[in-house]
Image (spheres, helix red, strand yellow):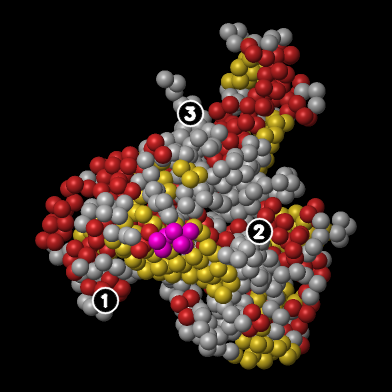
Amino acid sequence: MIATPKFGVGASALRKEDLPLLKGEGSYTSDIARPGELRGFVLRSPYAAAAFEITSLDAAREAPGVRLILTAEDIADLGDVPCLVRVAQPDGSKHEVRNAPVLCRGRVRHVGDAVAFIVADTQGEAEDAAELIEIDWQMEDANVSLAAAEGESVPLVWPELATNLVYEHQTGDPAAVAEAFEKAHHVTEIRLVNNRLVANYMEPRAAIGEWDEGSQSFTLTCGSQGVHGVRNSLAGHVFRMPLEKIRVITPDVGGGFGTKAFNYREYPLVMEAARRLGRPVKWVSSRAEHFLADSHGRDSIVQAAAALDAGGKITALRIRMDANMGAYLSQYGPMIPTMTAIMATGVYDIPLLDMHIRAFYTNTTPVDAYRGAGRPEAAYVIERLVDKVARESGMSPAEFRRRNFIRPEQFPYKTQGGRLYDVGEFDGHMTKAMELADWDGFAARAEQSKARGLIRGIGMSTYVEACAFAGSEPAKLKLNGDGTITLFIGTQTNGQGHATAYSQFIADKIGIDFDKIIVRQGDTAELMKGGGTGGSRSIPLGGVSVASASEGLAEKMKRIAGDELEASAEDIELVAGEARVVGTDQALSFAGIAAAAKSEDDLISVSDIVQDEATYPNGTHIVEVEIDPDTGRVEIVNYQVVDDFGVTVNPVLLLGQVHGGIVQGIGQCLNEEAVYSPEGQLLTATLMDYGLPRAEELPFFKFETRNVPSTTNALGIKGAGEAATIGACPAVMNAVVDALYRARGIDHIDMPATPQTIWKALNGG
């Protein structure tokens, strides 16, 4: 058995990134101060639906410190902030798109819509001037409810469309499913609300725009999940200029969760203002602006039904999903519900699927990807439904799952959603999780809780997700003159620990000190291509290319060292920053290799490994809760996870991803919900009103892996960035429902299961 190298793949290497951040040496966008920098402020709509006319800017323009005020008329030459996807409808057509204008043109469609951009010497002066802008508002009725988005008298977000319906999308065979339901021995139905969420990353967005008159080019500095995607959207759709005329830089980023992946209207605003003023312009979001202006997540209503045969096997699955798009179509917003469709059948061998999606406009903040992006919704539907089917069929949750799991011998397995699963041992990780959670001992623990006046419940979810979708992430390695190695790659760390993980791939192939590896991300000037970070793609795709590039660089280094040491390249080993002739004391430092290279190409290795299919992480979450019937408060008293991530690159980083994902899932289940008033005011627009989970409310998580390497990924890796969020929600809610059913026969409750909601359910409210 070969031991894992101290800093190689599989080692629990501590994060290289942490010490500078802990010492306050991080550099986030809002920390950066450009010489001569001005500050920008966005004047936003206080109404969800209104026509408006700016009647006077005079007082605002004359206010102290004001340098520029932009309205829609001033930037008529700029394109809208684009939606980049269109969904195929049942008739083969693709839906119309309504993009967000950089600044609204005479009509606002949600509270927080952008009306004007004020630039001044200071933030306070810009905000003060905004209050002096005179606007004539003509308020209109708003449509803020997905449940009431259609009907004859419903207010229309886009009147010219004559409907709030964005699109319809069909997956599966409705006729075959209808026949299966007619023949079914038993049918179970469920209605589920997937509550709207706000990302609430630690670092609100910020942006700095700069203009170089000589080269006629922009530089944008902003927190993002990939500089190339932001650049491409700005160049191709907003400014309509060559890619090389826009440079995008991303420094340290304090969380992304999908929501920082997009091009937002503040980015072209600071850029255009900088061009007009000839000075850098910075905009920094407040927490309140984050709630109003950054894309939201989830927000759907689902009706689902399963048809069963006499043996307890699911013969068909029918799902009807209504999804909220908000007032405009965000960058990938229309695609997100379709991601639910492709994973609708989960880990189960279900032969027939009929899933119909309808997406609607409402007078609310646009909705787009949030950690998991459609796949948490899929797992939530099938896992809540499966638990209800098991209850109605008189089977335990585990027994019913075992009867319906895709068996190991069935792989590769083509799902009704069109995905091709490569491998999986679903019963294996469920059984292991049940043993570790002491599932069989639950009855005794429930009696102990009852003696203390508490209600105890236990629930599980067995999930699968698709991530690291087909494609690639190129990696470029360079040996520097001082013997260090620099990696250039187009993913973007948002706190995941990319510098650590990528360094492990390099250290695995080249014997170099961990701290002498430099990882460069977040600058389009350094790498012209990159896919960014999202969909758990960075390590499965980027890591494979980094490993391959490392092998290529190692071969070049050995050839150069062999020539200098008069030895064969095959006799050279790379150890501790030196190239050594095996079995001798002859050696050449990595700096010496760099000096001996005949050309720069000899010091560079580029690799771009293409993956043909997604990877499919899967696992089991088991949760136990205690509910206080007097208050409705839920306490999670046990949380066990067993995951299959294929190959573990770094157990410490993996644990962090799992813990964070679970917490976000728990937050959605028990705390979080973006709530609008009938008039369209966001009632949960501060952290005083929006219930984020707190550390004191969380248990110690118990986590293990039972890995089955992927056959799709060159290194067997499956990805782990979103998996815990996907598995968490159904497990927590199944545990809550189990407790309520045991106590009062209550078999349904929606998220968030707040104390008030649970108390009402227990007391007939």
For discs 2 and 1, the disc positioned in front in the rendered view: 1
Could you tell me which secondary element the residue under label 2 belongs to?
Answer: strand
Q: Are marks 3 and 2 in contact (CB under 8 Å)?
A: no
Q: Earlier in the sequence, mark 3 or mark 2?
A: 3
Query: In the image, residue 229 lies at what x, y percent?
Result: 67, 55
Relative horizontal placement of residue 239, taking residue 728 as reference (left or right) = right
Dot label at residue 6 = 3
Question: Eyeballing the image, is 762 above or below 598?
Answer: below
| Main secondary structure type of the part rendered in magenta | helix
Q: CA distance from mark 3 to mark 2?
A: 35 Å
Residue drawn where x is 74% and y is 63% of the image: 237
Count neighbours of disc 2 (C-alpha within 10 A) and say few if under 14, some if 14 to 19, many if 20 or more: many
Q: In this view of the protein, can residue 652 be seen by the observer? A: no
Dot label at residue 222 = 2
Count neighbours of disc 1 (C-alpha within 10 A) and say few if under 14, some if 14 to 19, many if 20 or more: some
Q: Earlier in the sequence, mark 3 or mark 1?
A: 3
Q: CA distance from mark 2 to mark 1?
A: 45 Å
Query: In the image, residue 528 lies at what x, y percent?
Result: 74, 46
- In the rendered image, which residue does mark 1 sit on? 760
Q: What's under tag 1, amino acid-wise? A: Lys
Q: What's under tag 2, amino acid-wise? A: Cys
